[in-house]
Image: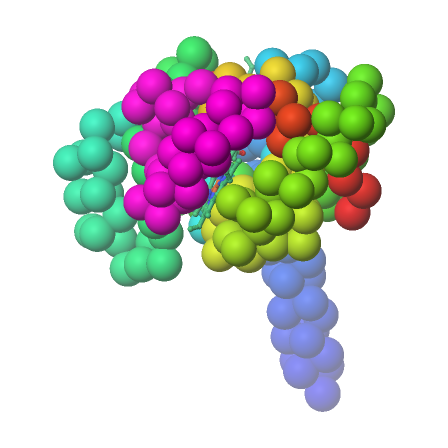
Amino acid sequence: MRLIAKLILLIGVSFTVLTVNANSRAEMLTATCIACHGENGNSLGPAIPRLGGMSRNYLLGAMLAFKYEESGQLNAAIESDPDLEDVEAFTRTSTIMDRIAKGYTDNEIKIIADYFSAQELFVGQQEINLVKASSGKKLHEKFCASCHEESGTSSEGDTGILAGQWQPYFLWTMADYLNGSRAMPKKMKIKLQKMIKVSGHESLELLSNYYANVTP
Ligand code: HEC
Ligand code: HEC
């Protein structure tokens, strides 16, 4: 009897130690990220994207793309790990994330993606032109909503999050897509090019006002 009680106690204690360890490991790994991306991924500076609400696979794809940079290496890393089977990653250039991402193993990146995908989408105050936001809504519905669901608040389909994102970050990202320094899904490219052809580059400014104004 005494032995069983001791065993149960021991199992209980090891479980607690295990969970505490997992939590503190995530905290340790994400401390650097939080310095820039903010507590819970709610970054306070317009050049640094907010991470809350993004799906695990989107975050994995982004981090691996920063880390491996070149598409051959990126695809090889994903294909060699059955855990990453559902991740679709698109190459992208960056100002600092390439260097940061290289400091982590793929397994550490998984722990980090778990952590940030559990954080909630946050929409902070930004200066918004409501007339532009309302035109942006129409463009969103016509060209983007089929994938960026629920007014861009959903990361369903591993699309990332558009709602509440900093406007400068959104505009730089769109510039990267248009000049080819960030790869995107083929169907998104078709819709984006069509929108620019029909409504011009001003459409990006309209969309950025719309996304900044969406409340989840
Ligand atoms: C020195 C500031 C800084 C630190 C530290 C930092 N980031 Fe970043 N992060 C950025 C910037 C700036 C970008 C925009 C891409 C670029 O220019 O590098 C970015 C982009 C990202 C993106 C892409 C977001 C999107 O919407 O696609 C992810 C994901 C990300 N960072 C995750 C992390 C993680 C995880 C860590 C910690 C391991 C981290 N970052 C540490 C500044 C930082
Ligand atoms: C066919 C589906 C599809 C359509 C249509 C689409 N997107 Fe996307 N979008 C995606 C996917 C998937 C990703 C994630 C790509 C990645 O992992 O790098 C994405 C990523 C993005 C990002 C990057 C988010 C970030 O945090 O860095 C932006 C910005 C974006 N899309 C804007 C748009 C806009 C604006 C439109 C309409 C003109 C649009 N998309 C239309 C599927 C789509």
Vertical side of 50 occupied by 85: above or below: below
Can residue 113 be seen here? no
Q: Quadrant of residue 40?
A: top right
| Residue lying at the far bottom of the rendered structure | 1
Instruction: Decide if residue 79 is in sight here.
Output: yes
Where is 112 relative to 196, above or below?
below
Q: Is residue 157 left or right of residue 20?
A: left
Q: What kind of colouring is applied to the model shown?
A: rainbow
Image quarter (top left, top right, bottom left or bottom right) of the N terminus: bottom right
Q: Nearer the viewer, residue 69 or 208?
A: 208
Residue visible at 56% across and 25% down in the picture: 204
Q: x and y percent of residue 99 in the render? A: 38, 16
Q: Which residues are magenta?
A: 175-204
From this view, report whether residue 141 is shown above or below residue 195: below
Count every numbered label the image shows and give the total: 0
Q: What residue is shown at x 62% (from left), y 21% (from top)? A: 205
Where residue 98 sits, quadrant-wise, is top left
Q: Residue furthest front?
A: 198
Residue 209 sits inside the magenta stretch = no
> Foreground residue, 40 or 155?
155
Q: Nearer the viewer, residue 105 or 129?
A: 129
> Looking at the image, is 74 positioned above or below residue 98?
below
Closer-to-camera residue (5/13): 13
Residue at image location 72% in from the left, 79% down from the top: 5
Left or right of 24? Residue 40 is right
Q: Position of residue 100 (x, y in %)?
A: 43, 20
In the rendered image, residue 203 lying in the magenta stretch gets the answer yes
Quadrant of the rendered structure where residue 28 is? top right
Residue 91, how many percent across, how many down? 31, 32
Main secondary structure found in the magenta portion: helix
State the residue at coordinates (69%, 15%).
Answer: 45
Q: Residue 164 location in percent, x, y?
A: 72, 34
